[in-house]
Image (cartoon, rainbow, N blue to C red):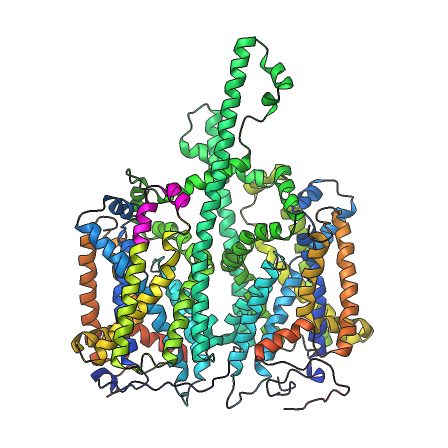
Amino acid sequence: MDTIPFINNPAPVAQANRIKSIDSIRGFALLGILLMNIPGFGINWSYFQTILNGPHNTQDYYTEAAVDIFFEGTMRGLFSMLFGAGMVLFLQGKKELPDGPTVAELYFRRLLWLVMFGVINAYVLLWGGDILYFYGLCGMLLYVFRKTSPKWLLVLGLVCLATMAFKGQLGYNELREKRKEYKLAIQAEKQKQKLTPEQHQAIEEWNSIEKRNVPDTARTNRHNTKMHAGYTTIFEYFIPRNAGGESYGMYQWAIWDCLGMMLIGMALFSWGYFSNKLSTSTYTMGLLIGYGIGIPIGVIMFTKARMLPHAEFGAFIDRYRVDFWSLYDVRRLLLTLGHASLLMLAFRTKIFSGLMKALSNVGQMAFTNYLMQSIICTLFFYGYGLGYYDKLKFHQIYYVAFSVWIFQLFFSAIWLHYFRFGPFEWLWRSLTYWKRQPFVKEKIVTANTDN
Amino acid sequence: MTENYRDSSTAGSSNFLYNSNPSRLFTIDVLRGIAILGILLISIWEFGGYSSNEQLGLQLTKKGSDYYLFTLMQMLVEGKMRGILSLVFGAGILLFLSKPNHPNLPLNQELYIRKQMWLIAFGLINALVLLWPGDILYHYGIVGILLFPFLRLSKKGLLIAAMFATAIYCGKMYWNYSDDKTKLKKYKAVLLVEDRIKKDSGVRHRKDSSTGILAEALRKNDSIGMKKDTLTKKQKEEKGAWESLTKNIKYDSTNAAEKAEKKKLSGGYSAIWNHLLQRTQYKESMWLYQIGVWDIASFMLLGMALFSFGFFSNNYSKTRYLIIALVGILLGIFLTYIRIKLSHIKMPDYEKYINKHVVAPNQFFPLERVVMVIGYISLVLWFVRINFLNWLWNIFAAVGKLAFTNYLMQTVICTLFFYGYGFGYFGRLSLKELYFFVAEIWLVQSVFSIVWLRYYEYGPAEWLWRCLISAKRISNKKIN
């Protein structure tokens, strides 16, 4: 990356040296991630079942279809990719100093603080869908790959994603096995045979699996009561959930999900994909392939796997040997590529330069904006705030999301007019370098002070 | 995070193994050797199928030589050897990073991270391929990475961090105990409800027979009759939570769980793989998150602190080592005595225990481990210092130099001896027989380590590890 000038630490990246296109994409992803998170903040998950099993001409249904086909997972994907790219940027942009902390130390300190922020986001701000914790830990594993060639990074990333699909398929096989045993037991029951304890268990087990797909009003109400309660109740309610996610979820799922996309992001960054270095035709190809294949897969997945009425669940399992969810990462990767290409093309045409500038502001303050989404949304939806949890219709919660977008677009622009970093970025940096960082913007931004 | 240069002077030990390589510390190798061999005294329970139920049964008898042997292990060994190993690992982190950078290799810090990454990989192999769910390499790899940012902390800072981690570890013990208490409280509440339901139905029944009023009419008019006469789902869950908790810690004379376990472990490789997978995954995710990270980090940080203080380089006077040793071990034995006493009260009736005690038996287990471990290492350092039993420390040092090899070798030997795809001795040996087997392994590993080091510089696994870290083939010829 010879275009990125070397800067001695601990000076932060000067304004002029930031890669604008990356900031714009990051801003886009940051705002986009709210599309997927807002249901987690504001609505009971059983609502999805209600929408999908209900009539198809409602606004709720169209919203759900659009979000599910075009965006689900892709914003997290884009964000992970840029996180990988950011790690490379961080490590490449710094020279080793004779004494003082090495770049490696700064890198790991930075990530350990990120893990801490993630823990706070989950346990204190009470956002159960926090991703910072996972990024912090996965980022630590990226360090040794920072000099790996892009080709190998891509291969490694794909291996991670394939591992997920493979694990998904194994789980699906188990499900099919249970279904088979259930059917055999049912058959035996019909023939008036005496059932063995194993067969009884098989029937019971399958029934409980099917039950999971049916909305359970008692459970929904219990959950909503908790979410409408005060801070301590929700805090306690979230402990096992957060602990499970940060341990088991990390080990089984997040590691592959995040690491895969980060590695691919590092590869794409090394090829110059995010820094506006490739030809317009390459980005156009990316767009066409990404959307051209990604969207149809999204439609298939939505109509087959997502939209499945719970009554047909068993028949579905009988019919398909391959888990439709194994397409999840194929779709996600393609659509993410499509989004990135679209943004790069938009960035290039300069028609949208105003929007790009606004997004780039949001992206520069991504960390602040991410945490702010937790703060705003929990205060809007949870019981200790305005208490709108599960009170709005599905499409209505997106009005909240759009309001947050508008607020963050303006807030970021105004903030960066006066300050060098977002507040949490500043805190994070100061903690990483263990030294108070300059905060207020000077009138003239010196382009490359080199010191 | 200010101290840039730390005292890393290595001990000028006049030992034969250490003339060649000044970057090793004799004392650290000795301690590592002791820990590696000692760790088997406890892990043999799990390797050999000496189940927790059997342990419970033995502890309830409170007599016989097996009982005393087992209690002795609980008091003097359990948790301590792993403590020493973690502590020495922590010291090793600073030792590794304080060496001068190699001219032809990347920076030590880079090598350190690679080392940890490979350790994680070896841990996964140890757990998921060699099938040892009790593996710790994976955990050490991860915690080693998490502690990397602490390397510039001052001596005092490291000590404070260690105490902080120990405090959280103790706090977790308290938290777990209060969880149990809450479970008991809810269970009792459910029992009361259940009681009332029984009485209500009794009352209703009496009314029915005496007045002859229809039950349905009664249900409409009578407030008692209106009440639900079964437990709600949540109440059932709360009842079950306590019941399953006590079931797991109560002695089962039928040994049903052990028999099932023994049958599983006598199967072939893939059957055992499937059976152990869940346990391994739990250990590598939930356990690490809730307990392991504090357990391991507290000792590693302590080891880093002690290293900075020059504890392993014999920086203190002889008498000081002796005093620390005596105080540490005596205090440790006192704490362990209380723990065992309390656990003997807990075992037969947990409910009664909870009613009478504010803390769990293992509340101060983390503290007990810390003082005991400090006592042990001081004692060893004192012995080394006064040149007492030199031949013994040389053997331990040899084992310690091959610690990684020996650790993996224990897995290979034990799984092949106990599991079904090997000789299948799982669950078939008595406690004494198990310890006879341990002694055999000690003998084999000591001899192997000494002989190997006569011809090679590094143990086979250590050599492979080094090659992987530096990404090239390293000569393993003995440097003279």
Left or right relative to B477: residue A267: right
Q: Position of residue B419 (x, y in %)?
A: 28, 53
Q: How many marks?
A: 0
Q: Nearer the viewer, residue A362 or B459?
A: A362
Vertical side of B438 occupied by A437: above or below: below
Q: Which secondary structure class fits the magenta region best?
A: helix
Left or right relative to B15: residue B194: right
Q: Position of residue A211 (x, y in %)?
A: 57, 38
Q: Position of residue B433 (x, y in %)?
A: 18, 53
**Residue B78 visible, this angle:** no
Quarter of the image for residue B69 reads bottom left
Quarter of the image for residue A218 reads top right
Q: Nearer the viewer, residue A2 or A131?
A: A131
Vertical side of B416 occupied by B153: above or below: below
Quarter of the image for residue A339 reads bottom right
Q: Position of residue B340 (x, y in %)?
A: 30, 53
Vertical side of B78 occupied by A267: above or below: below
Q: At x 43% / y 56%, what residue is drawn? A: B173
Reply yes or no: does residue A125 show up in magenta: no
**Residue A27 visible, this angle:** yes
Quarter of the image with the C terminus of chain B is bottom left
Q: At x 30% / y 76%, what residue is drawn? A: B28
Vertical side of B146 occupied by B179: above or below: above
Q: Nearer the viewer, residue A38 or B331?
A: B331
Reply yes or no: does residue B353 show up in magenta: yes
Q: Give the magenta range.
A: B339-356
